[in-house]
Amino acid sequence: MLAADFGRLDAGRSPSKKHLDIARDSFNMTPAIADTRRSAALPDFYEPIAADLVLAQQAFVDELRSDQPFINDLTAHIGQYHGKMLRPALVLLCGRATGRVGERHHVAAAVVEMVHVATLVHDDILDEADTRRRVQTVNRLWGNERAVLLGDFLISHAFHLCSRIDSQHVSRRIGATTNAVCEGEMMQVVNRENFSLSENLYLEIIRRKTAALIGVSCELGGWCSDATPAVVGALHNFGERIGTAFQIVDDVLDLCGDEEIVGKSLGRDLAKGKPTLPLVHYLSTAPRAARESMLALLREAGEADNGHSAEIARRLQHHGSVAYAQDIATNMIQGAQECLTILPESPTRATLSAMADFVVSRRL
C-alpha cells in the first residue's frame, strides 16, 4: 500500500473494510502462523494488527502533509519505501501482547517508521545507492541536497508527532534512540576500510545503528499498554536481539543476495569499505596468505568492482564465514525467544516468536 492510499483516510475515522482489504492484499497476509514460517516476507505476520497498521500509516501521512507541492511529491515517493514495516508492526504487536492497542500505539508506530525512513534516505546518500524497494532513491531522482533535507524533515516531524502523546516519555526515548542511531552511523563511517575491526566493535555499531530503534519499538509497544517495567525491559531486549540478527542477515544478503529479490542496490558494503561480520570473521581467522590476498581484493573492489565482489563472497562462503555470521544471528534469535517467556501465552506472543524465527531465514 502506498502512502497515497492512506492519505485518503479521514483523520479520526476507523478504516473501512475496503482499506483493510487493500492492506491485507498489499501485505499478502495469511492467517496461519505455521504457514507464515515458510512465507516470503515479514508482513505475512501482520494480520492480527492490520486495522491498527492502517491507522498508524494514516498518522504518518497526515503528519507529513505540506502546503508545498514539491514536498508532497517527495513524501509520496518515500511512501514506496514502506516495505517490511517491521518497526511499527512490532510496536503494535507488543502492544497487543501486553494489553489493548490504542491511539498512543498508532502514534508511536508512525514515529518509529518516520525515524526509520529518515535513516534509509540518509543511508542511500552515504552509500550512493540507486534503488530502494525496487524504485529509484531520492538522491538518484532529486540529488543529495533534497535527500538530506528530506531526511531532516522526517526527523523533525517525528518529534512533532510525539507531542500527540500526553507524556514526554516517548519523545525522550525516541530522542535517546535517534542519538544512538546517529552515533552508530558515525562509528560505521569512521571505521570504513578498518579491516582490523573486531567482532565486538562490529556488534556495537549495529546495536546502535539498527537494533536500538527496533528495541525501542518493542519497548514502546509495552509502555503504551501500561506494562510493568520488567515486561517493558524484556520487550526492549527482545527487539535489540532481533534487530541485531536482522542487520547481520542484511549484511549477508548484501554479499550473497539476489538484487531482484532483495529489491535494493547490493554490494554497497564492499564498495564503501564497510567491514561486516562475515568479513570480520574471515580476516581474523584465515591464514596469513589468504588474508593478504583478500585485502588486495577488497582494495580493488573499492575502486572498481570488475567481478571482485562475487569472488569475495565465494571465499567468505568457502571459509565458513557466512555460516558463522548466520550462526551468530541464530544465537541472537534464541536469546530473543527467551525474552518472550515473560509474556503470557497468546496468539500474539506466538506471532512475535514466529517473526523472530523468520528473521534468520529471510531472503529479503
Image: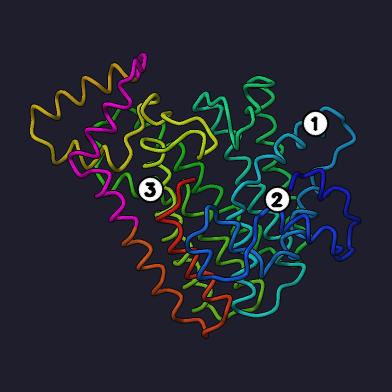
Q: How many angstroms separate mark 3 from mark 1 (CA)?
A: 33 Å
Viewer-closest of 23 and 107: 23
**Over which residues does the magenta segment extend?**
302-329
At label 1, the amino acid type is Asp
Q: Does the stretch in magenta take in 315?
A: yes
- Position in image of residue 147 (x %, y %): 66, 28
**Badge 3: few (under 14), some or many (20 or more) residues near its Cα, within 10 Å?**
many
Judging by the rendered image, the residue that carries numbered circle 2 is 159
Q: How many discs appear?
A: 3
Viewer-closest of 303 and 27: 27
Q: Does the stretch in magenta take in 323?
A: yes
Judging by the rendered image, the residue that carries numbered circle 3 is 248
Q: Is residue 156 above or below residue 174?
A: above
Secondary structure under tag 2 reads helix
Viewer-closest of 264 and 138: 264
Give the residue furthest to the left.
Answer: 288
Identify the residue at image location x=40%, y=25%.
272
Judging by the rendered image, the residue that carries numbered circle 1 is 73
Question: Which is in the foreground here, disc 2 or disc 3?
Answer: 3
Secondary structure under tag 1 reads helix
Residue 131 falls in image quadrant:
top right
Question: Which is in the foreground here, disc 2 or disc 1?
Answer: 1
**Residue 115, disc:** none
At label 2, the amino acid type is Phe
Q: How many angstroms separate mark 2 from mark 3 (CA)?
A: 29 Å
Identify the residue at image location x=67%, y=36%.
152
Q: Main secondary structure of the magenta part?
A: helix
